[in-house]
Image (cartoon, rainbow, N blue to C red):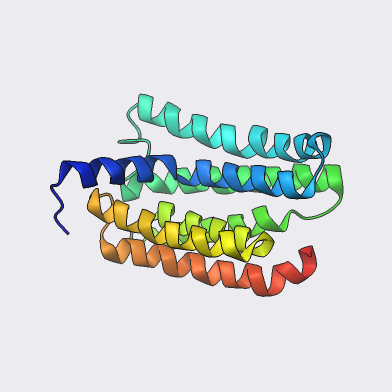
């Protein structure tokens, strides 16, 4: 898909940059906390996610871009993504261990995120599956568990995000589809099995 229209390219860039996986996950955690917790409870729950997962991953990417290990903040190079996946998976495992130690319960949302990332890492040996598409579809499932309307809306947004990745030539249509299939698989497990445990 060759798109040269500067307006479409600008809009695609904005959507792709704003709805990167870290931002989308933060938006979900904010909303979940707002719906389910008091301000004090939300702070206690969200702070470990921020300190052990979101900030370390953001800093890891930024540091590696600055050092020249990663080509860009999207980590568009398939080989470069291997170390990114390893770091994110380790960060999720550390968070799960700390969170279980503090609350004596498993954070199923992050556990399923960890499984999704492991599958993405495995797929990365064969195809550079779109993280933007995959993680946003997973976020759509997380929203769906709280509000089906928001979940469906976020899923449609995920499709649009996938299209922007193709327009910007960050991924091929096959890579976007691969990320989507992996995320739908994990999301269906979350919605059918994990939802029973959580809710």
Image coords of residue 177 (percent x, y): 35, 67
Front position in the image: 86 or 170: 170
Front position in the image: 131 or 96: 131
Describe residue 95's horizontal placement relative to residue 168 as left or right. right
The quarter of the picture where residue 26 lies is: top right
Examine the rendering and report whether any part of residue 180 can be seen.
yes
Q: How many labels does the image show?
A: 0
Instruction: Work out which quarter of the rendered image holds the N terminus and state it.
Output: bottom left
109 to 60, vertically: above or below: below
The residue shown at (62%, 72%) is 189
Instruction: Work out which quarter of the rendered image holds the C terminus and state it.
Output: bottom right
The residue shown at (48%, 48%) is 85
Examine the rendering and report whether any part of residue 118 can be seen.
no
Residue that protrudes farthest toward the bottom in the picture: 192
The quarter of the picture where residue 108 lies is: bottom right
59 to 79, vertically: above or below: above
Image coords of residue 64 (percent x, y): 41, 30
The residue shown at (51%, 41%) is 23
The residue shown at (68%, 60%) is 146
Image coords of residue 126 (percent x, y): 34, 63
Residue that protrudes farthest toward the top in the picture: 66
Front position in the image: 155 or 138: 155
Residue that protrudes farthest toward the front in the picture: 149
Describe residue 26's horizontal placement relative to residue 68 as left or right. right
199 to 47, vertically: above or below: below
């Amino acid at each position: 898909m060759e798109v040269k229209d500067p307006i479409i390219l600008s809009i695609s860039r904005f959507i792709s940059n704003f709805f990167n996986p870290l931002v989308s996950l933060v938006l979900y955690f904010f909303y979940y906390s707002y719906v389910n917790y008091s301000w004090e409870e939300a702070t206690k729950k969200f702070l470990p996610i921020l300190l052990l997962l979101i900030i370390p991953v953001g800093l890891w990417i930024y540091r590696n871009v600055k050092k020249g290990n990663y080509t860009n903040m999207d980590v568009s190079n398939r080989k470069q993504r291997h170390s990114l996946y390893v770091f994110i998976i380790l960060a999720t495992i550390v968070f799960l261990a700390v969170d279980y130690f503090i609350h004596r319960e498993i954070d199923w949302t992050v556990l399923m995120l960890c499984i999704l990332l492991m599958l993405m890492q495995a797929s990365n040996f064969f195809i550079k599956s779109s993280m933007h598409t995959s993680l946003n579809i997973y976020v759509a499932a997380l929203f769906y568990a709280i509000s089906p309307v928001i979940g469906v809306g976020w899923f449609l947004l995920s499709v649009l995000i996938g299209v922007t990745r193709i327009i910007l030539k960050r991924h091929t249509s096959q890579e976007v589809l691969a990320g989507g299939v992996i995320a739908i698989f994990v999301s269906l497990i979350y919605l059918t099995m994990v939802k029973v445990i959580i809710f």
